[in-house]
Amino acid sequence: MNTVTVLAIIDFEARPKAPLTRMMNERLERLAADLQVLLEKELREVRDCNDLTVYLSYNSSYAIRWRITNEVPEHVIHTVADKCAQLGYIAWKANDIRKFNLD
């Protein structure tokens, strides 16, 4: 695999109270960086997929959720799902992603 990208997505509508905002954003960015390193190691030998992009965010209960945002083979989806499940992250429902304007 050529490129693995894990992005921390901040939901500005569901932000916690001000003192926690910075800490939670930094935590989410750190977890995204850690997941990126983990997936790069796990998918290093994959040859049938060039790029993987994963969004990481909090849900309304502040649990970590993940979502693959580009087309990848099924075995890559399963690898990401397994690693995220091991870390206690939940799958991001498809209709939630439309809340963000990432342009």
Image (cartoon, rainbow, N blue to C red):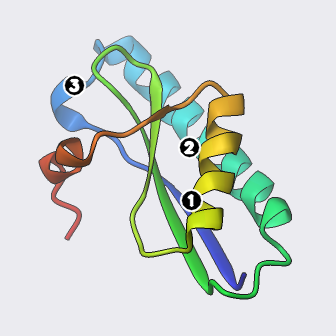
Q: Which comes before the other along the chain, label 1 or label 2?
A: 2
Q: Position of residue 57 (x, y in %)?
A: 41, 38
The span from disc 3 to disc 2 (Cα, nearest Å) is 17 Å
**Residue at image mark 1:** 77
Q: Is residue 20 above or below residue 77?
A: above
Residue 30 in view, yes or no: no
For the residue pair 95 and 7, the one nearer the viewer reads as 95
Query: Percent x, y for residue 33?
Result: 67, 51
Residue 96 visible, this angle: yes
Callout 1 amino acid: Ile
User: Which of the 4 quarters of the picture holds residue 1?
Assistant: bottom right
Secondary-structure class at tag 2 = helix
Spatial separation of the CA atoms under disc 1 and disc 2? 22 Å
Q: Is residue 50 left or right of residue 20?
A: right
Instruction: Give the mark toward the camera: 1 or 2.
Output: 1
Q: Quadrant of residue 15?
A: top left
Q: Is residue 37 left or right of residue 68?
A: right
Q: Which residue is mark 2?
A: 29
Question: Relative to the observer, which residue lies in front, 26 or 86?
Answer: 86
Circle 3 residues within 10 Å: few <14, some 14–19, many ≥20: few
Q: Residue at 40% of width from left, 18% of height from top?
A: 62
Rendered image: mark on residue 14: 3
Amino acid type of the residue that numbered disc 2 sits on in the rendered structure: Glu
- Say which residue appears at 69% left-offset and 30% top-offset: 87
Q: Who comes first in sequence, dot 3 or dot 1?
A: 3
Of residue 90 and residue 11, the one placed in the foreground of this image is 90
Image position of 72 (left or right of 20)? right
Residue found at x 56% / y 74%: 73
Residue 63, percent from left and from top: 45, 21
Q: Position of residue 66 (x, y in %)?
A: 47, 43
In this rendering, is residue 85 above or below 79?
A: above
Nearer the observer: mark 3 or 1; the answer is 1
